[in-house]
Image (cartoon, rainbow, N blue to C red):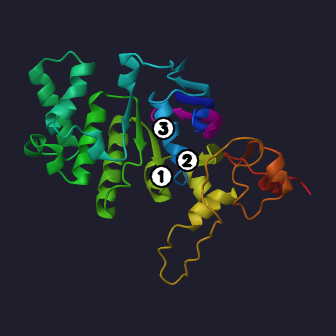
Amino acid sequence: MSERLLALHDLQVRYPIRKGLLRRVAGAVHAVDGVSLRLDSGGTLGIAGESGCGKTTLARAVAGLLSPSGGRIELFGEKAPQGHWPLALRRRVQMVFQDPGGSLDPRQKVIDAVREPLEAFTRQPPQARTERALALLAEVGITAQQALRYPHTLSGGQKQRVAIARALAAEPDLIILDEPTSALDVSVQAQILNLLADIHDRLGTAFLLISHDLDVIAHVCERVAVLYGGRVVEAGPVAEVFREPRHPYTRALLAALPDPDPDRPWRPETLKGTVGAPEGGVGCPFRQRCPLADARCGQETPKALEIEGSVVFCHRVEEQQRPA
């Protein structure tokens, strides 16, 4: 049985809304609103949803970059500390950001960027750290000559490879990938995804992958959780959720993917409105845009409904599952 690596219990992250000359708190944005998830050692979990649904906030909370407003994060069987994490815990959880250029020091050579975590987390002598940094860069496709360059001389894909090598330098148990391919060209995206899949196969490192692109999640992840308004609306094995999506939001996301069959017309489902700032409260967070919403959707918060290994939060799906 797999060891539980990460567990979220009713996780909440709220941003205060300030108004007036005195900037008094007048409310809060519920960026993450009661999320409960689990990721086992060596597993791969994708977090899907449109921009503004709470994906990045969730990732930053798991990485210790944000303090939760409520709920609990468990890492490696223990509650994650509030505030500053000990060095041993930071070594085990690393993060690769969406913009590789913004996460690399422009005044630091590539090899120094990878050597830095080795200095922080190991007691290797300088020569051994340099050799290890070069080996890590070679594993992700960066040559020794490129290792002596500054980040601005590299392409976007090469910068992302450096960021991945730097994360691997700490030998983490969990790597959080926040939209790792969204800033890259399509051909480069495929290369980075294949690199991530190879790393997972060779090292068994667990991935928490944040992406709005369902094809990316399908390529890398075993399980997926779909977020809307800071809440999980559907979760389960990727193959099951993508084969038979049950929540209206999941169906709309999948229908928006272009169909590769040129003889079949592409008619994506259109959703009215856009993702607004989640304000919490009772009811389904998707009800304002859902074509199936009724009065109950605004009066009761949907409960978890387990169907064939997946979990869905939807009143209408619940009604369909009731025996006649």
Q: Residue at x 10, y 43 (%)?
A: 149
Q: Which residue is mark 2?
A: 224
Q: Quadrant of residue 111?
A: top left
The stretch of residues the image draws in magenta is 25-43
Count every numbered label the image shows and give the total: 3
Q: Is residue 245 visible?
A: no
Kindly indicate whether the residue at mark 1 contacts the one at mark 2 (C-beta within 8 angstroms).
Answer: yes
Is residue 92 part of the magenta span, yes or no?
Answer: no
Name the kind of residue labelled 1 in the image.
Ile
Percent from the top left, x then y, of residue 314? 75, 51
Is residue 204 left or right of 81 when viewed as pictured? left
Q: Nearer the viewer, mark 2 or mark 3?
A: 3
Using the image, tell me which numbered label, if any, was put on residue 59.
3
Percent from the top left, x then y, of residue 212? 49, 54
Q: Earlier in the sequence, mark 2 or mark 3?
A: 3
Percent from the top left, x then y, of residue 259? 51, 73
